[in-house]
Amino acid sequence: MRTPRGCDAVRLAEFEILTMALSALEWRAHNGPVTLVTDTVGAAWVREHHLECVWSDVDESLTAMAEAPIDEVVYWAAGKLFALRRQTTPCVLLDLDFIVWHPMDFTRYGTGVAAIHSEDLQPHLYPPPETFRLQDGYALLDGLDEAVRPINGALVYHGDAGFAQRYAQAAIDFMEHTAPGDGDNLPYMLFAEQRLLPMLAAKEGRPVYEIAPLHELFGKQKTFTHVWGYKDTLRRDEKARNVFTEKLRQRLKRDFPEAAACIEKGW
């Protein structure tokens, strides 16, 4: 959780706070320790809102991102890539709005990479890399296969420290040496987070596993919940937001009563 440059406070809706709390607590209950990687502003916000009980640890290392020459409006998820660069493996990167309700066996993926699902190469989201505006003499890595399907970065397992470091650094190099214009810059972030990883893995002959095909996630499965696609509705529709927020409150009270009581102190 990176506080955008120039901001002196974390601003999240209640449903976002409760979602990330439930995400962390469910992960701890079923899959082990979970660390919130943030900066000094984020860590202070956690303490102010009595949320220390949610995570196993709070890491303030993203404070150093303030010195990076990155447009944090365009690269709004850059914090995950800086965080990955500091992790030991095996590890899992988990978005704050992604909930895993049951235990998972990541040992099957060994030293490979596994992502929650792959994505179609939609041209408006994943245009040809040569369309990116590069600067300072930077060039993309040679040998990247443009036909490789992107992955979704909401949940990604890394089993090999060397590859995780190479990918994270390649993504950071890309973000630091691109000059997005005034148009739709989403493809830049998607390339760094979701396309470069499988392209680099393919170049190295490293497998990238799909944990659950996308069509299965919209079925009757009860293992994963990703709130991402529902956020716009929740922000616009007060009734839907209130109903969803109350469901989160009740689920936290039912599954994690001590943490729920701690969280309520922060309101």
Image (cartoon, grey):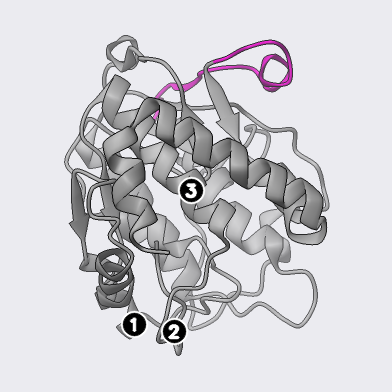
Identify the residue at horizontal 53%, vertical 44% (top origin). 97
Secondary structure under the numbered disc 2 in the rendered image = loop
Secondary structure under the numbered disc 3 in the rendered image = helix
Location of residue 188 with respect to 98 vertically, above or below: below
Is residue 221 rendered magenta in the image?
A: yes
- Residue 17 position in % (x across, y down): 48, 55
Identify the residue at horizontal 45%, vertical 41% (top origin). 200
Residue that label 1 marks: 66
Identify the residue at horizontal 51%, vertical 34% (top origin). 250
Q: Main secondary structure of the magenta part?
A: loop
| Residue type marked 3 | Leu
Residue that label 2 marks: 5
Distance between the alpha carbons at the discs numbered 3 and 2: 24 Å
Of tags 3 and 2, the one toward the viewer is 3
Residue 245's tag is none
Asked if residue 245 can be seen in this view, the reply is: yes
First in residue order: circle 3 vs circle 1: 3
Residue closer to the observer: 157 or 136:
157
- Residue 112 position in % (x across, y down): 34, 23
